[in-house]
Amino acid sequence: MKKYSYSSKIILLIIVVISLLCLVKVVTNNNREKTRDRVINGFSRNIFNSNKIINYNDLSEDMKNHITENEFNSIDSWDKAQFLFNSHFQETKDSSIQGNEFDFKYDTVTNENGNKNSIAYEVCFVSTPFNMRISRVFIVIDQ
């Protein structure tokens, strides 16, 4: 059996660590894009999340501490969503994004109840080991 030198073991260890870090980065970016696309597909409708693409399990544990599953599932309009999310998370709106979070802003136009509204929302995600969870949502409706 061939013996490896101490330096070649260190080089091999460095290669393994770098490979794992690259894999984590690729998986995180993939999860981020999938979650972002799901949120845009769920929120860019006339009625907030009308097709139930976003479900209660997509929320972070912190958000679940503020919003019950019944409250989340009862959201049937952008106005209710704005009230629920903004009232629970107004105090954290100005807090900075943490290292394991990312956010995006998106604008859409809806025709809810015959009224054309411009809606801007910002969604913050927190990264978990295998996926992304929604940690905060801020909604502004320009009527």
Image: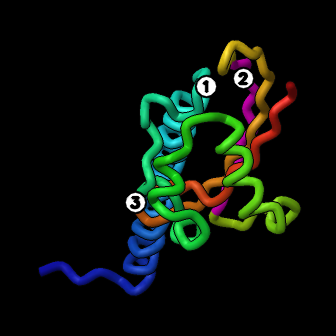
Q: Quadrant of residue 99?
A: bottom right
Going by the numbered disc 2, the residue's amino acid type is Thr
What residue is shown with label 1?
Answer: 44
Q: Give the secondary structure at mark 1.
A: loop
The x and y percentages for residue 115 are: 75, 16
Q: Give residue 96's mark.
A: none
The answer to whether residue 24 is left or right of residue 125 is: left
Going by the numbered disc 3, the residue's amino acid type is Phe
Going by the numbered disc 1, the residue's amino acid type is Ser
Is residue 8 depicted above or below 95 in this figure? below
What residue is shown with label 2?
Answer: 108
The x and y percentages for residue 126 are: 59, 61
Mark 1 is surrounded, within 10 Å at the Cα level, by few (under 14), some (14 to 19) or many (20 or more) other residues, namely: some
Residue drawn at the location 41% of the way across and 57% of the way down: 57
Q: Magenta span covers which residues?
A: 101-110
- State which quarter of the image contains the C terminus: top right
Kindly check if marks 1 and 2 are in contact, taking CB atoms under 8 A apart as contact: yes
Per the model, the C-alpha gap separating discs 3 and 2 is 29 Å
Q: Give residue 130's mark.
A: 3
Q: Nearer the viewer, residue 38 or 129?
A: 38
